[in-house]
Amino acid sequence: MAPTRMSSGTADPTLRTGRAPATPVSLRLDGRSLPVVGTARVYTCGITPYDVTHLGHAATFVWADVLTAVLASTGVDVHCCRNITDVDDVLTTAARERGRHYDEFALSQEAVFEQSMRALRVATPAAQPRARHHVGAVQQLAQGLLDAGAAYERDGTVWFRGAGLPGRAGVDPARARELSAAFGDEPDHPGKDDPFDVAVWRPSGPEHPAWPSPWGWGRPGWHAECAAMALGVQGSSVDVLVGGDDLLFPHHAYQGAMVEALSGVTPFARAAVHVGEVRLAGEKMAKSTGNLVLVDDVLHTCTPAALRTLIVDRDHREPWSFEVDDLHAAEGRLERLYAAAGRGGATAAAVAAATAPLLDGLDVTTALDVAESEGGEAARRVVQLLRLG
Ligand code: ZN
């Protein structure tokens, strides 16, 4: 017999608890609303710990921090995961060049990175999975992809079938091939069916770390590591995927495709924040070229709040160049903001007007403009949300 249901129309009003809540608000990204119930899951592609932290890294992680604060301001819990890629050929090579063991070297570099993040007041993510703790998860992923027919094994390598991925990612095949080569996916490898197949698992020679597996001694591929860590920590999908815009293809395209092929849940990421690259003298800031501005060096010349302002007072998607004059301009912006925050007043409507742009695509520049002009509580709220105090 079905249970009888009490009519809500006759409910005793004394049983009602709490006050009427404010209307729930959601973050909008790329023009689309991202409603969240309960907990927002954010996956940020973290560092390969083989060198010092430069401004390009800092930009990605400060934007991830702003995203987290803005999501939290909507009243949901935010579960942030920022991985550490401590099994990677560039790390192994860097460690060997310095005569150090790769995992000891990675740990020392992680400590330096964390110091830079603390100096920049980036909140520590709830989860910081390390690739070397997820080797078993990559093997589970490889087996799942084999079982699903999305991968095949040949000579100790488990290849993920990626033939259609450039098209799905909207990347021209010739450009996709260049990018695959640049990120170590070996499009010309003779042992695979298609140039865009990538290794989920691959055999290791004596110069690389190796774990036993059903396919012989080997190590995980980079995209598979992030797929396995995301699955292990956040489950089959995430609300927002964050990373530098150079990760769009191939890394995030393959990470998402592997997770989707395994779980059947599509899309892997409901939304993405891809942060525009930071340049110096017109060139991309990168360890490989030595064209770098280091976070610690900049922080010897300015406050963390000034550097955060320089990073976030712009469209997060656009590339930009580091200029010392712009750092001074950011200091000026901050002074005006603090002066505005010192004024009294500001209505609830003014506070809402200052924070609304943050909810609409993380528009920090407009939020700072409104905060400056409204002053008082509106400015204080924006300073607090962006951790500029
Ligand atoms: Zn990643």
Image (cartoon, rainbow, N blue to C red):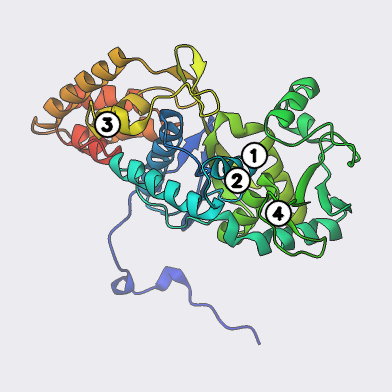
Amino acid type, callout 1: His
Query: Which part of the image, by quadrant, shows the N terminus?
Result: bottom right
Residue at disc 3, secondary structure: loop
* Residue indicated by mark 2: 92
Whether the residue carrying mark 2 lies under 8 Å from ligand 1 is answered with no
Marks 3 and 4, Cα distance to the nearest angstrom?
37 Å
Vertical placement of residue 300 versus 105, above or below: above
Marks 2 and 4, Cα distance to the nearest angstrom?
12 Å
Sequence order check: which comes first, mark 2 or mark 4? 2
Front disc: 1 or 4: 4
Residue at position x 28%, y 31% in the image: 354
Residue 312 horizontal/vertical position (percent): 36, 28
* Residue indicated by mark 1: 252
* Residue indicated by mark 4: 219
Residue at disc 4, secondary structure: strand
Marks 1 and 4, Cα distance to the nearest angstrom?
20 Å
* Residue indicated by mark 3: 299
Characterize the local packing of mark 3: few (<14), some (14-19) or many (20 or more) Cα atoms within 10 angstroms: some
Name the quarter showing ligand 1: top right
Please state which of residues 337 and 360 is positioned toward the viewer in this rendering. Answer: 337
Front disc: 2 or 1: 2
Residue 66 horizontal/vertical position (percent): 38, 39
Characterize the local packing of mark 4: few (<14), some (14-19) or many (20 or more) Cα atoms within 10 angstroms: many
Amino acid type, callout 3: Leu
Whether the residue carrying mark 1 lies under 8 Å from ligand 1 is answered with yes
Amino acid type, callout 4: Arg
Front disc: 3 or 4: 4
Residue 244 horizontal/vertical position (percent): 53, 32
Vertical placement of residue 373 versus 118, above or below: above
Q: Residue furthest bottom?
A: 1
Residue at position x 16%, y 33% in the image: 346
Marks 2 and 1, Cα distance to the nearest angstrom?
22 Å
